[in-house]
Structure formats: C-alpha cells, structure tokens
Amino acid sequence: MIKINVISGFLGAGKTTLIKKLVKEAYCGEKVVLIENEFGEIGIDGGFLRDAGIEITEMNSGCICCSLVGDFGKALCKVIDEMEPERIVIEPSGVGKLSDIVRAVASSAEGKAEICGTAAVVDAGKCKMYMKNFGEFFNDQIETADAIILSHSKKLSEERIKEAVGLLHAHNPDATVITTEWEELSGSKILEAMESKSALSERLRSFIESEAVKKEEDEHCHCHDDHETDSCGHDHDHHDHEHEHCHCHGDEHDHEHEHVHEHGDGCSCGCHGHHADEVFSSWGVETAVKYTEEQIRSILEEFDEDPAYGMILRAKGIVEATDGGWIHFDYVPGEIDVRRGSSEVTGRICVIGSGLNEEKISALFRA
C-alpha cells in the first residue's frame, strides 16, 4: 500500500520548507512523488522544490478544494499507476480545504494508497488574525489535521505561543501540536508525530462517513433556492453577501482587528460553503524584466505600507537579477525573504490575496 502524507497550511505558513526538510531527513531512500497545487495561473513552488530532487505533478489555475477535485482524483490515480511511488506527498494550495483533500483521496485511491498522516503548518504569529478573517479555510485545515506544526515562532513570546496553542486546541483537541523550533527536530521526528494517529484516524474516518451521509441527504432534498428554509428543513445559502476585508498587515496588530463579517457562527469570509476562488484572487505574470534585490525588497515593502493594493496574503517569485543570476522571493504580511536561487526559463511572479488591485500591482512590478 502506497503511503500518502497531506501537508496543508495557509498562505506562506512554510509548507514548502517543511517538505524540503522531510525529503532530506525523513523520506531518504524512498521514491517520493509530490502532487502540488497552487492557487493562480503562475506556478512558483515547483521551482523551489525541484532543487530537492523529487518528482512533481503540478496543477495550477485553481484550487484542489474546489474546481480541481475531479482533476485531482485523475492525477492521483495516474501517479499511482504510472510512477509507482512508495510515498506520495500532497501539498494543497494555501487556501485549500484539507477536508476536501482527505475526501478526494479516500474516494480516488481506495485499495491502492492510504493517508498515513496529515499536517497543518500554522504561522504562530498570524493564527488569531487568520482565524478571525479567513476561518472557513484556515480552521478547516486545523480541524482535519493529525498534527499541527507551528512555524515562525522564534520571535514570539511564550505567552503568544501559548495563546496560539490554546486557539488551535479549541478547534482540534486531538491533534499533536509541535511547538519546538524545526531546526531542533529531525524530519523523521516530525513525520513520526504526523503518523502517530494511525493510518487514517477515527476522527477522519467519521468525517468521511458523515460527509457521505450529508451528500446522500442533499441528493434527496429537492428544495427551491428562493427560501432560506423550506418544508424539508434545510437551510440554503445564496452567496449574495457584500464582503469587506480588513487590511491587517503584520502579526503584531492582529489583536486590533475585529471580525468584519456577520454571516453567522464560525463564518469568516462569507457564508459556509464558499469556494476559494469566491473569496481569494491571484495575479500572476511571466516576465523578462530584471530586478535588483533592493528593488524587489522595496516592492514587497509597499504591500505592508499601502492597503490600496488590496489585502496581500502571499507574494512569491523567481526573477532574473540585473547583475546576473536569479532572485527568489517570498512575502507574507510583515515578513520578507529575498535571496539568490537557481535559474528558470523565464521570470515568474504570483500575488495572492483578497480584493487585489491588479492594475496597481502590475505597475509596481513593471510587468
């Protein structure tokens, strides 16, 4: 039976970094295939991960959790049948719902492969802010994970980390929460924590079974969409709300932002059941423009300083440098990483967020 690990995490949490660590320190000697999905037209992370020496099946132009569920099932079966790996690592889009991945794997790979560990990588400093503003997506990853792995916690106080753990346990009391800095743990130790809940935990089995029952009920319910509640007793969501998005850039201010949506208990970016592409958008471009590291850093700082670009949750890219070589960069609110890396056939930039001003972003990158 082929082992499957699903490593989720909200935008910029550090999934790619964790996968690199697991490949180097835990998956040694195994034939590993990564199925990666990115939200947006322009794929970036594949370039980062190829340096780790693993095979990649990459899917863009949407999110595994919504428009690509069917394609995902086909891709998974093709990987199993044609590549014959010993292990498959699935990295969903940062705005993907982990529950949908578990559901899709269970229906597509039965008898051939099984999930033996799921993880949600969580930026400890942004946990509270993302719960408030993007709970429908963020909380789903937490609630479905066997292990919750904190990232970016080095600069946080013990009190802030304790608060984050409390919030996470409130949504998933059964998960193993890893608070130790990654460099202090081996990849094999992290993998052990992910897989200690058995091949597919009772919690996830119950979830899959309950979803199957729910789907059967929905199929037998011939309700009309013009009522909030009708004679069959089912509530209906119409997705006709106006959405506002707070421009909270930087984790040090997350306590200042109240939840801006009023769509019911547990809802954040709209009524329950939204697809990622109804809440988030992306801007991406392939470019031959050359930059200096200082120019890239200055561009990314603009996202923190000027809310007119929209609520930028993630920016990443590989671009050619003016002095030769290539620049790799990553951005999440309040954190910028600009470094040198391997070359690509052309430059690629991707920006993900909510309420994006694409014209203004394009002008900023001179794209």
Image (cartoon, helix red, strand yellow):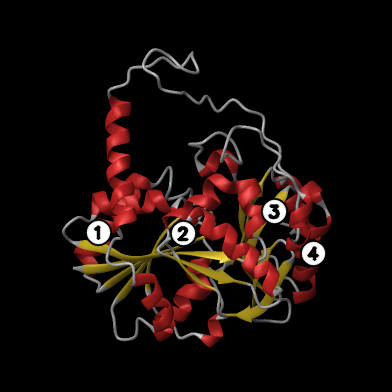
Q: Is residue 84 left or right of residue 241?
A: left
State the SS at label 1: helix
Residue 286: percent from the left, percent from the top?
60, 59
Disc ID at residue 200? none
Give 268 or 77, whichever is nearer the viewer.
Answer: 268
- The three-letter code of the residue at mark 3 reads Ile
Structural distance between the alpha carbons of marks 4 and 2? 37 Å
Q: Nearer the viewer, mark 1 or mark 4?
A: 4
Q: Nearer the viewer, mark 1 or mark 2?
A: 2
Disc ID at residue 173? 2
Counting residues from the N terminus, which is met first, the one under dot 4 or under dot 2? Answer: 2
Task: Give me the residue at 39% from left, 83% from top.
Answer: 188
Task: Give me the residue at 74% from left, 71% from top.
Answer: 291
Residue at the outermost left position: 111
Counting residues from the N terminus, which is met first, the one under dot 1 or under dot 4? Answer: 1
Disc ID at residue 301? 4
Residue 245: percent from the left, percent from the top?
71, 42
Quadrant showing the C terminus: bottom right
- The three-letter code of the residue at mark 1 reads Lys
Task: Give me the residue at 59% from left, 36% from top.
Answer: 270
Disc ID at residue 78? 1
Q: Nearer the viewer, mark 4 or mark 2?
A: 2
Structural distance between the alpha carbons of marks 3 and 1? 35 Å
- The three-letter code of the residue at mark 2 reads Pro
Q: Is residue 298 left or right of residue 95?
A: right
Q: Let me know if residue 71 appears in the view.
A: yes
Counting residues from the N terminus, which is met first, the one under dot 3 or under dot 4? Answer: 4
Q: Return the residue at label 3.
A: 312
